[in-house]
């Protein structure tokens, strides 16, 4: 299958040409059917050029929109791998309809995400509260899908609930479901030959960057069936992913292709999800053989010696006859209701008169021996 392509065509026709279960991640930004009617003026008297495009106002009824939605979702599900992820974004006019149809089709909803716009368009008439968010839905084809989720990498992306000073000091928190991101503007916003915005609803790259970072791997295939200004393709290329963009509007394709062509691949720790790399498994026994620990060495907790280390990696107390592992032992010492705790995080040994966590020595062994 050819990838890293921009296809100018109808999404139904073009999706039908793709092989079944061939893409890893889908991001869809379909028509919202904003139901725009009449002219809206700013307080200054100038006309506000919102989303009154033909592609968004092609529907004649709720049933018409539902049928359109069902068809494109089904077409996407055909090409999505069993363990792939599916994202869709929408406003209040459409997202509830889309979500209901997704569930009707048997999809499993994982999260909804609120895109909280830091610079939303004001409500010019003052007849309702400011519409300052849109909603994203993350789902899979089934409840049993083993989807990619780079959990620790997602923490590295969380600037929404961690102050900049705390983040710089190493504080990390789970990425939440409310994302504070500004509406696309400035140099990121594509302009046409007249110098006006090319697309009414161009999405900010930051949204795609987060999703692609924690929901895919380098080399994965990302599909966008409503490509627009090809934001998904541009971000995917920069992050070392493959992309397939489908867009019906020829002008959007031409400008979007130039945008993608100007992007250089830039793969770093976020793109590689190195934060989620699992360290190689090592045992006490092999570290004893390598001289990083010694048999009969004392293990301390809270400054007090409790156990002696045995040659096979088990530990034992002077007043006990049965050896035990470090995880069960710390749970016992701490009188935890859990039968096991992570002993690497609690036990220490003495080195030159100073107590050092055994995990620090384990990491030293991994660096010097396992990764050597």
Image (cartoon, grey):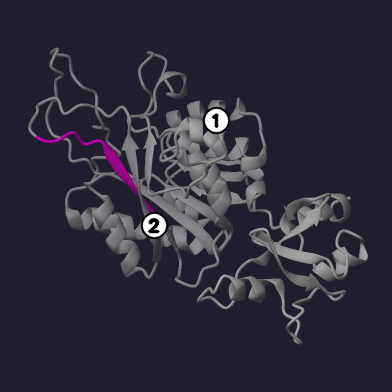
Q: Residue at x 57, y 56 (%)?
A: 24
Q: Residue at x 10, y 35 (%)?
A: 128
- From the top left corner, tell me how far across and down residue 134 is, in percent: 30, 42
Query: Dot 1 lies on which element?
Result: helix
Q: Residue 6 versus residue 96: which sits nearer the camera?
A: 96
Residue 89 appears in the figure: yes
Q: CA distance from mark 1 to mark 2?
A: 31 Å
- From the top left corner, tell me how far across and down residue 309 is, in percent: 81, 71
- From the top left corner, tell me how far across and down residue 43 is, in percent: 13, 16
- From the top left corner, tell me how far across and down residue 45 is, in percent: 13, 13
**Residue 173 belongs to magenta span:** no
Of pointers 1 and 2, the one earlier in the residue sequence: 2
Q: Residue 89 versus residue 8: which sits nearer the camera?
A: 89
**Residue 136 belongs to magenta span:** yes
Q: Residue 270 versus residue 302: which sits nearer the camera?
A: 302
Describe residue 318's horizontal placement relative to residue 236 as left or right. right
Q: Say the numbered circle drawn on residue 89.
A: none
Q: Answer whether labels 1 and 2 touch (C-beta < 8 Å).
A: no
Residue labelled with disc 1: 257
- Residues in magenta, as a range: 128-138
Describe residue 258's horizontal placement relative to residue 30 as left or right. right
Residue labelled with disc 2: 111
Pair 1/2: label in front: 2
Query: Dot 2 lies on which element?
Result: strand
Q: Residue at x 52, y 36 (%)?
A: 167
């Amino acid at each position: 299958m050819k990838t890293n392509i921009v296809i100018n065509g109808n999404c139904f026709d073009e999706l039908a040409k793709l092989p079944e279960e061939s893409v890893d991640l889908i991001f869809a930004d379909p028509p919202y059917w904003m139901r725009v009617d009449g002219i809206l003026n700013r307080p200054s008297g100038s006309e506000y050029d919102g989303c009154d495009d033909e592609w968004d106002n092609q529907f004649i009824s709720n049933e018409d929109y539902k049928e359109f939605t069902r068809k494109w979702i089904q077409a996407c599900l055909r090409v999505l791998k069993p363990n792939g992820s599916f994202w869709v974004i929408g406003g209040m006019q459409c997202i509830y309809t889309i979500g209901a149809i997704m569930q009707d089709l048997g999809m499993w909803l994982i999260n909804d995400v609120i895109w909280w716009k830091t610079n939303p368009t004001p409500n010019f008439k003052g007849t309702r509260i400011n519409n300052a968010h849109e909603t994203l839905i993350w789902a899979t084809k089934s409840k049993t899908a083993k989807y990619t989720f780079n959990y620790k990498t997602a923490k590295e992306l969380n600037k929404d609930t961690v102050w900049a000073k705390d983040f710089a000091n190493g504080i990390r928190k789970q990425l939440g479901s409310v994302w504070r991101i500004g509406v696309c503007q400035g140099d990121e916003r594509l302009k046409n030959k007249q110098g006006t915005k090319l697309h009414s609803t161009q999405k900010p790259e930051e949204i795609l960057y987060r999703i692609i970072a924690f929901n895919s791997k380098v080399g994965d295939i990302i599909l966008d069936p409503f490509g627009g200004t090809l934001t998904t393709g541009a971000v995917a290329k920069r992050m070392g992913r493959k992309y397939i963009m489908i867009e019906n509007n020829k002008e959007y394709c031409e400008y979007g292709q130039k945008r993608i062509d100007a992007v250089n691949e830039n793969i770093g720790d976020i793109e590689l999800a190195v934060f989620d790399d699992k360290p190689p498994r090592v045992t006490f026994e092999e570290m004893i053989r390598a001289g990083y620990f010694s048999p009969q060495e004392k293990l301390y907790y809270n400054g007090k010696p409790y156990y002696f280390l045995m040659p096979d990696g088990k530990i034992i107390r002077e007043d006990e006859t049965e050896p035990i592992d470090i995880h069960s032992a710390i749970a016992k010492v701490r009188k935890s209701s859990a039968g096991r705790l992570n002993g690497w995080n609690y036990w220490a040994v003495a080195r030159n008169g100073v107590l050092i966590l055994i995990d620090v020595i384990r990491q030293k062994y991994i660096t010097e021996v396992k990764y050597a």
